[in-house]
Image: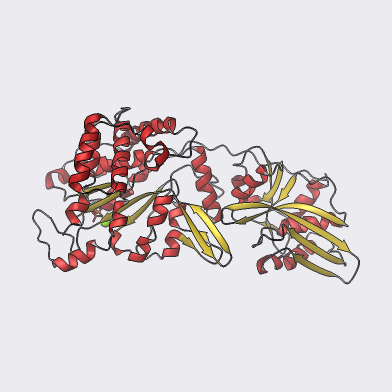
Amino acid sequence: MFVKINAMGLFGLNAFAVDVETEISRGTPTFDIVGLADVSVKESRERIKAAFRSCGEKFPPARVVVNLAPADTRKAGSVFDLSILIAVLKAQGRINGDLSGTAFIGEVSLNGDIRGVSGVLPMVLCARREGFDTVFVPADNAREASVADGVTVYGAENVREIIDHLNGEKLMKPAEPYVPGPAEYFEKADFADVKGQKPAKRALEYAAAGGHNLLMIGTPGSGKSMLAKRLPGILPEMTFRESIETTNIHSVSGLVTKENPLIVKRPFYSPHHTISGAGLCGGGTTPKPGQISLSHNGVLFLDELPEFSRPTLEMLRQPLEDGQVTISRASGTVTYPCSFMLIAAMNPCPCGYMGHPTKKCTCSRQKAKEYINKISGPLLDRFDIHVEVGPVDFKALSSSEKDEESKVIRERVQAAREIQKERFRGTDITCNANITPDIFHEVCPISKDGMELLESVFEKMGLSGRAYDRIVKVGRTIADMEGEQVIGKKHISRAVQFRTLDRKYWND
Ligand SMILES: Nc1ncnc2c1ncn2[C@@H]1O[C@H](COP(=O)(O)OP(=O)(O)O)[C@@H](O)[C@H]1O
Ligand SMILES: [Mg+2]
């Protein structure tokens, strides 16, 4: 007897529908899985046979052939276990009913339990696109799957439950659709704890409001790391679409939990400087997302920037520009989105005291230059905002006066984002930093005197095309923060001020 059951496969972020075709015929008992299935899939034979015994079913003493179609797409992992098992049962006549609108996702363990798998959300979203109305997933993944509305999700603990449900003997309860609550901001670290450092705080506020990359340079112990760690507390809310995108990436990395099935708070990753290129940008035999993709729609913070290996830093250039990263391996090519805000902090020289008002810098010219040149021109060019974080004076540090709280700053950031949401409605653009060339002039009108200022600094500072582009975008954000339609001279002037440290530190 021949049957067809629906399953879902995944490569990178791309989920695809798989037909599990099964035929049982007379002959020497065998169990074969064909259709470009890799070793991990072939291993499911043993698990499935054991699971049959465990749930009191008899594996057919016949020739069993399973074909995973389309046969030209590579299939990997244990995610097809459940669908193959159901297909064999159905071909044996042990399961009744029409399963044409149902898909099965999950790994089966030897005792018939169903184990959680990664990548459930993108697979269920794909099942919905394919027009399936019902999916069976591991109980562990049920909350994650129920984020996709418009499809009935059943979370199963074991195989027996599913058999009894499909045969109408004991019905399972579908998972409740997941409704996310508002993002919770319980950041213990508040901007109010950071004394002084007004320009840096202002710069971080602009960065959060427009999604801009930012570089902080300053002497040790001035509060750079402290400031960056407080950024998550002022980031704007995620849109639902951003949440889904970011959750998909975490899902394929196996990082979605039952407690937090949907990521509603912008991610903030801060890898150590010993991280490898693959860890940062993605890699592995079946390429997994790196930290830049996990930070999608959020923040990647690189503290002590020059301590990262230069090749690793250079790998960031293309993804920073494109908002996505493509990884090629023997198993295939995968593209992951990585539209993140890059925040970096560094000392101005190895000893840290170059330019300090009272302490003397002990670095030789050569050493200082080598250090600063770890950050290449093209990488530096990708920071929209540069800000110097000077030493805090005693008066500010010892003052008991509270500075502005993160909550107040976040409200301003959110207001600027609302303007952007309206501006970019119907496009893929999420914030000012991502404005594309085709709408650049339309959404960035500059006043006449603003344009004159821009022209004069362009020539005086020898700006690159990219620098020009980024100054205007930061100007756009500053104007939004002030609720102004047209980018004026004062906005341009402030954006330019935030772009001068390359000349101070990287010039001989
Ligand atoms: N502006 C500041 N306000 C309050 N405390 C500060 C400030 N700057 C530094 N500190 C104190 O010094 C410590 C080190 O600051 P940190 O952010 O690690 O400096 P950096 O990263 O610039 O070297 C902080 O944990 C904090 O206790
Ligand atoms: Mg630090």
Quadrant in which the N terminus appears: bottom right
Query: Relative to 388, is 53 on the left or the right?
Result: right
Name the residue: 34% across, 63% down.
273
Which residue is at the front of the view, 459 or 125? 459
Which residue is at the front of the view, 457 or 411? 457
Residue 30 locus on image (x, y percent): 83, 70
Q: Is residue 444 above or below residue 461?
A: above
Residue 117 sits in quarter: bottom right
Residue 326 locus on image (x, y percent): 49, 57
Query: Relative to 33, is 398 on the left or the right?
Result: left
Quadrant in which the C terminus appears: bottom left
Residue lying farthest bottom? 28
Q: Is residue 27 above or below residue 408?
A: below
Residue 48 sits in quarter: bottom right
Does residue 195 appear in the picture of this structure?
A: no
Does residue 298 appear in the picture of this structure?
A: yes
Residue 35 locus on image (x, y percent): 73, 63
Query: Relative to 182, is 316 on the left or the right?
Result: left
Colouring chosen for the image of the structure:
secondary structure
Name the residue: 50% across, 61% down.
327
Name the residue: 84% across, 60% down.
23
Residue 71 locus on image (x, y percent): 72, 60
